Image (cartoon, helix red, strand yellow):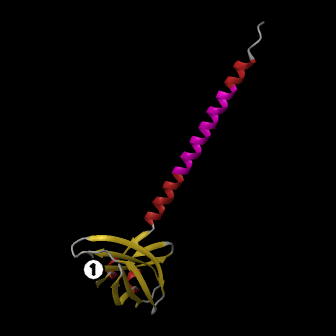
Amino acid sequence: MERMNKRAISEWVSFLLITLLAIMLAVTVSEWMTERAKESSESIEQRVYNDQLCDIISIKAENTTAANDTIITQITNTGTWRINRLMFESHNGSSVLEADKKEIIIKPSSTKQVTTPQLANASLLYITPIAIKDGFEIICTNKKIRVNI
């Protein structure tokens, strides 16, 4: 009986181990990507536009000034629900130049000074209140206000 070459066996074992490692890595990455996609789709589903909550949300902008490429305005929550974010849309009269969301908490009957960048050819600023209820982001586009710059 012939003896097997030990070196040939060790090459097969190392090939098998590397293959198993590659398969385990592929399964791990695949599971991570699947879970990440599920989380992203859940966060998209948790965005609601013009819910009944928007009936008690209202904002008012006062004392708006534009200087040094920034717009400063006083935003008052005139509704009875807390506002968690504001969405700012800069317009040139016919199209949106830029949209930006800011985490700004304004309690009912409270006022906060808000600063946002001003684009060179922007003449209008639309501000939309956003509230959070039960994990849902409620964007009240029907309560959007217009501010002339």
Asked which quadrant contains residue 16, the reply is: top right
52 or 4: which is nearer to us?
A: 4
Residues packed near mark 1 inside 10 Å, few (<14), some (14 to 19) or many (20 plus) = some
The magenta stretch spans which residues? 13-33
Magenta-drawn stretch contains 42: no
Judging depth in this view, the residue of 120 and 3 nearest the camera is: 120
Q: Is residue 101 above or below residue 56?
A: above
Type of the residue with mark 1: Leu
Q: How many marks?
A: 1
Instruction: Looking at this view, name the residue that lies furthest to the front.
Output: 68
Judge whether residue 20 is colored magenta.
Answer: yes
Q: Confirm whether residue 70 shows in the render.
A: yes
12 left or right, relative to 104: right
In which quadrant of the rendered image does the C terminus lie?
A: bottom left
Task: Indicate left or right for 45 with 9 as reference.
Answer: left
Is any atom of residue 50 visible in this view? Answer: no
User: Vertical placement of 105 versus 29: above or below?
Assistant: below
Q: Quadrant of residue 111?
A: bottom left
Q: Which residue is mark 1?
A: 124
